[in-house]
Image (cartoon, rainbow, N blue to C red):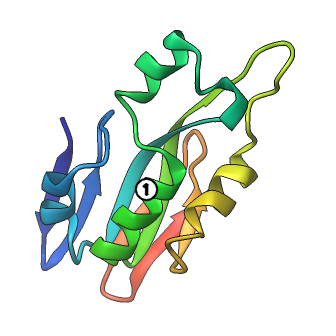
Amino acid sequence: FGFRVDYGGRSAVVSGDTRFSENLIRYATGTDLLIHQVAAVRPELLTSPVFQVILAHHTKPEEAGVVFARTKPKLAVFYHFVLLGTPQVPAMTEQEVVELARKNYSGPLLVGEDLMVFRVGRQGVSVKK
């Protein structure tokens, strides 16, 4: 499930766990704030059946970049990072995930943090950390 809240001519969308979704794009297009989950694994671990199952329920960074590019939010935010790794192959970093998303999206993008607060107002979206 995802959620869209509209109030006073402004909107915020929060995706739940989802694969790339045209439905999400449809409902998030033009939103002020889009908060989206993301999952990433290094290419050498893609053959793992366990990681394949996890990735089947999440959006990859490049796909999230496409979602952001198509919806054109005033602010895009990553949350609920699923960063997969093993003792031999470390998980990707949040910065690497952002770099992968940037292949398809050049707009405003933040990495969400616990207790981060967003204000969606007439002057745009402001952030309190």
* Residue closer to the observer: 73 or 120: 73
Left or right: residue 84 versus residue 8 is right
Looking at the image, residue 64 lies above or below residue 15: below
Quick check: 61 above or below 115?
A: below
Which residue is denoted by mark 1 in the rendering? 64
- Which amino acid, by three-letter code, is at mark 1? Ala
Location of residue 16 in the rendering, given as x and y in whole percent from the top left corner: 29, 37
Location of residue 110 in the rendering, given as x and y in whole percent from the top left corner: 58, 62
Question: SS at mark 1?
Answer: helix
Query: Relative to residue 26, is residue 17 drawn left or right?
Result: right
Residue, x 58% and y 39% (percent of image)?
Answer: 114
Taking the view exactly as shown, the residue that stands out farthest to the bottom is 123
Image quadrant in which you'd find residue 40? top right
Pointer 1: residues within 10 angstroms few (<14), some, or many (20+)? many
Whether residue 117 appears in this view of the structure is no
Residue 94 visible to the viewer? yes
The residue at 45%/28% (across/down) is 55
Q: Relative to the observer, which residue lies in front, 103 or 2?
A: 103
Return the x and y of residue 84 as percentages of the image width and height: 64, 25
**Could you tell me which quadrant the C terminus lies in?**
bottom right
Identity of the residue drawn at 13% across and 68% down: 7
Looking at the image, residue 92 sits to the left or right of residue 18; the answer is right
Q: Quadrant of residue 24?
A: bottom left
The front one of 9 and 45 is 45
